Amino acid sequence: MRNTGYRGNKGDYRYITVDRDVQLLEFLIEQAGQSRSKIKATLQGRGIKVDGKCVTQFDFALRPGMVVAVSMTKKNNEGLKSRYVKIVYEDRWLVVVEKNIGILSMAAGHSSLNVKSVLDDYFHKSRQKCRAHVVHRLDRDTSGLMIYAKDMETEQILERNWHDIVYDRRYIAVLSGEMENDEGTIANWLKDNKAYVTYSSPVDNGGKYAVTHYFTHNRTTEHSLVEFKLETGRKNQIRVHSADMGHPVCGDVKYGNGDDPLHRLCLHAFLLCFHHPVTGEPMEFETPVPSQFRMLFKH
């Protein structure tokens, strides 16, 4: 292994010669003596070069004899800067983001603020020749984890095999009132009326069958902190099913009862687990329960 320090105009680089077939991130963790998060920041900040060319992909395949240059000064300057979208994971095929409230998953009408355009702008600025492809959606006022494909082939694999690829998807919500049950399942048919409001029916009304499992984590006389696991992913499914139980999601202007303690829709997609559409590797992502939600249950 050959390490040579180099000081140039573009910051300090450390050069490492590759001695085997290995993925870039794994190699850097072994060689660079930095944390995984710092290495990822350097990658996203375009601080890694392979044979003189800038590389941002964590899974870039290294071969013996290649020379990796690691910037010792470059931080994540060109990474995604948005108060609405945070990149949790990125490789050459897809990106996993955590979406904030107040932003659409994709463009609708004249609304310019959407995750897809934020990602497209980031890809352009980081000189990636790709665009964000939408494969599923979260409502504008729902926060949490989402996948976007970076090419048409990956998008199609995800869309065609969504229910096989995604093996666990969970949400956390603050519901109005005190939940009676610790856990349970709601199953019925959901259909939109002419005003695009989704309503449920205990019998087949020509709509789509929807199944939601719920687990009550915490409760007060005013509110309940409830986890939801989706078996199906219908439009507004959790919001309609919560209202069906008599405990709508807090802050829900469409299906709620006016209970709005946090001045937001209290629904967050906190867990997303899927088999990678290209490599088949299990990918598991989890975000903390929003601190605002937890504050309502401090006794």
Image: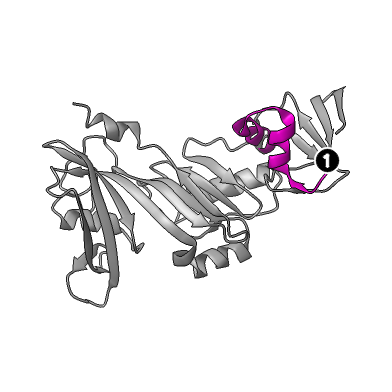
x and y percentages locating residue 263 in the rendered image: 26, 36
Left-right relation of 64 to 154: right
Residue at image x 88%, y 43%? 65
Assign a secondary structure to mark 1.
loop
> Which quadrant, please, contains the C terminus?
top left
Residue matched to label 1: 18
Can residue 56 be spotted in the picture? yes
Residue 105 visible from this viewpoint? no
Q: Residues within 10 Å of mark 1 (few under 14, many from 20)?
A: many
Q: Nearer the viewer, residue 215 or 79?
A: 215
Q: Position of residue 35 (x, y in %)?
A: 63, 29
In the foreground, 86 or 163:
163
Type of amino acid at the residue the image marks with label 1: Val
What residue range appears in magenta?
Answer: 20-43
Q: Position of residue 250 (x, y in %)?
A: 22, 43
- On screen, residue 223 versus residue 213, left or right, reads left
Residue 100: image quadrant is: top left
Q: Is residue 40 magenta?
A: yes
Residue, x 75% and y 32% (percent of image)? Answer: 31
Residue 116 to residue 39: above or below: below
Helix, strand or loop for the magenta stretch, by majority = helix
Residue 258 part of the magenta-drawn span: no
Q: Is residue 247 left or right of residue 286?
A: left
Using the image as rendered, state which of residue 87 and residue 261 is in the foreground: 87
Give the percent coordinates (x, y) of residue 60. 73, 48
The residue shown at (59%, 53%) is 94
